[in-house]
Image (cartoon, rainbow, N blue to C red):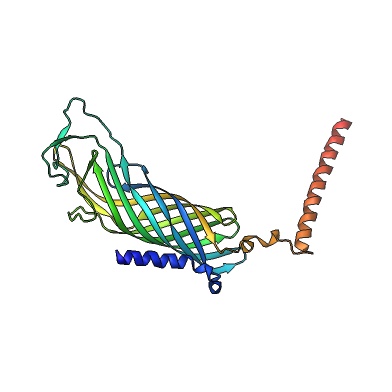
Amino acid sequence: MKKILTIFVLGAILSFLSIESKAQIVKGEAFMGLNLSQVDGDQAYGYRRLGFHGGLGAIVPIYKKNNFNFDIALEVVFDQKGSHQRAQYVDNNNNTYFTTGLGYDGYFVSDEKDPVTGAYDLYMNYLEVPLIFYFSDKQLASIGIGFSYGRLIGLKEYEHGKLTNVNLSYTGEDKYNLNDFCFLGDLKIRIYDRLKLGVRFQYSMAKIRTRDFYLVNGEYDCTREQYNNTVTARLIYVFNEDRSEYIRDEYVFRGDNPKIHQKSIDKKLKKLRKQEERALRKAERSLE
């Protein structure tokens, strides 16, 4: 836990380096959004787990040319991931019962009987440190690709509406890996001044769990490896960003600028040509 807190504090310091005058090239960012996630391999399908996404980051330009540049970003993120499946069926005749523990690898220790509903919920909280390389059009968008390291700091699992004993201290063969290394792709679009809209896709590079699945009668069904699969939508605010450097040169008025004047002349000439063409067509129709 001390290491996790150290990483978080380090990320917070990095994200606000832009406040110092001697580090003007470094920009800070704060972001907040929502995750839509699933766990591939858990027999619950679809991006149905809604979770919080938020954190801080630092952006360092590494190469700049004209209106385009490459940046590297380091973030510290709190991410909620998991999986969800609502009840799939109801046993009104009390026929679809199983003895708890049967087919679920010792999750339950009671011999009481519970109804099988097919409901499943998994809640996972991660503290993550993504490292992303961005290619940016300074006026509009940034496209990034990178990796992240995540540490599992919270875990709850429910099956058929019952809380299982799978948690951070669980030591069974099908326990969750506390470390999650992910590949990610990211897109950011400027929507107003320093405010941006971002979309991110993230997928585990290594399995987070291996689990055996059984039928309700206790017979072995299959073994699956599980991976986090997450789509994130977020709002991003960038600190200490010189907005003027993100405006293309051709849109900046610098007094007697020949390029600006030529654009204005070309626009007026194009308008006059269209007017002449319309007048000519009108005259031809009147002579017919």
Q: Residue at x 24, y 39 (%)?
A: 161
How many numbered circles are shown? 0
Q: Residue at x 68, y 62 (%)?
A: 249
Image check: 206 left or right of 288? Answer: left
* Residue 127: quadrant of the picture: bottom left
Q: Tell me if I can see residue 61 in this picture.
A: no
Quick one: which residue is furthest to the top in this view?
A: 93
**Where residue 154 sits in the image (x, y, percent)?**
29, 54
- x and y, in percent, of residue 255 in the image: 77, 64
Q: Residue furthest right?
A: 287
Q: Is residue 182 left or right of residue 259?
A: left
Q: Position of residue 170 (x, y in %)?
A: 20, 54
Question: For the point 38% across and 50% down, which residue is it?
Answer: 230
Query: Quadrant of residue 258 in the image?
Result: bottom right
Residue 82, image x, y percentages: 32, 48
Residue that lies at the very extreme toward the left in this rendered image = 111
> Which quarter of the figure is the C terminus placed in?
top right
- Is 116 situated above or below 236? above
